[in-house]
Amino acid sequence: MAAKKIRSNSLLLPGKQWFYRASVVMLVTMSMALMVMSKTNNPAVIKLRSHIADIVVPLLSVASSPMDAIHNAGTWIGEISRLRTDNVALKNENIELLKWQAQAKAMETENKSLRALLNVVPAEKSTYITARVVSDIGGPYIHSALINGGTDLGIKKDEAAISDNGLLGRVVDVGNSSARILLLNDINSRVPVIAETSHEKSILVGNNSDAPTLSYIGGESKIKVGERIVTSGDGGIFPEGIPVGIVTSVTKGGAVKVTPYVDATRVEYVSVVDYSF
């Protein structure tokens, strides 16, 4: 029985080899036939060739679809990566632009403040120095301001300090790189002034309030509410004509209160001025 099985397998093996060889020969023959058909203009051949193409093209399309999908997916991923890179770059650029915009606005505000200072410096001045008001660290005066300039910039004691709206006060202490300005409303402040309309001279005296008063005015004073008060030039410290404030109250007893033009809490820059008389 085993001998018969071995004999049948040995007879089957040559049959398989013949089939494989016949398949190869047939494929080669078909290939050559297709090559010949591609060169032939016979209508029947052309029609057969078309039928073959109709069969082969869908098969090739199906076979190429996965490759196209892979290619398209790769292109899509590459595009997403590029868009992400561009988005990050745009965000960084936007941040830089916002920084420059903030700096530009700060410089614009600063330039406006500095240009405004030039409008209140009288023509009699010889030199002036612009400094920034910094945080006060305390001192012997109740109402004063500290600036970041001193003898290193040429600032001297008793020089006038003005802002864009008018007189702020005068220098009372000077260091190498700082100086202290006594404000108009400090109780130690005394400024010779004149009423712009009535032309009455007096002394603006600080009282540690927001409204210093006028002293040494006559009993028949004609000073009225709303009148402008400017420096008179007496005393040799301030020249005449610097805006000081406006009269806001006149009592029956003759007390006159003046609200300064300059709000010291809002001042960023001051000009310390050395005048030539």
Image (tube, rainbow, N blue to C red):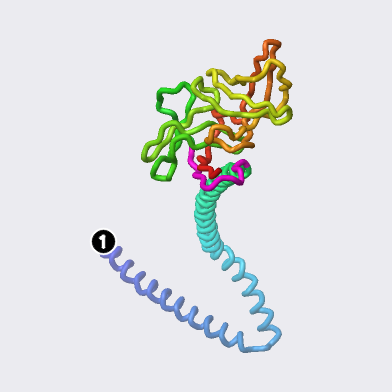
Q: Residue furthest top?
A: 253
- Residue 184: image x %, image y %? 55, 26
Q: Nearer the viewer, residue 138 or 108?
A: 138
Residue 77 position, x and y percent, is 51, 56
The residue that disc 1 covers is: 2
Numbered marks: total:
1
Up/down of 169 relative to 117, above or below: above
Give whichever of 124, 146 is nearer the camera: 124
Could you classify mark 1 by the number of other residues whose Cα lies within 10 Å: few (under 14), some (14-19), or many (20 or more)?
few
Residue 145 image point, x, y percent: 47, 30
**Segment tinted magenta in the rendering:** 120-132
Splitting the image into 4 quarters, where does residue 219 fall? top right
Residue at 55% x, 65% y is: 64
Q: Residue at x 53, y 46 (%)?
A: 103
Q: Along the horizontal axis of the image, is 90 left or right of 12? A: right
Residue ID at (52%, 81%) = 31
**Residue 106 in view of the camera:** no
Task: Locate residue 218: give its quadrant.
Answer: top right
Magenta-drawn stretch, dominant element (helix, strand or loop): strand
Q: Position of residue 254 (x, y in %)?
A: 67, 14
* Front position in the image: 191 or 262: 191
User: Against 159, is 202 above or below?
Assistant: above
Question: Is 122 within the magenta?
Answer: yes
Residue type highlighted by circle 1 = Ala
Quadrant of the rendering where the C terminus is positioned: top right
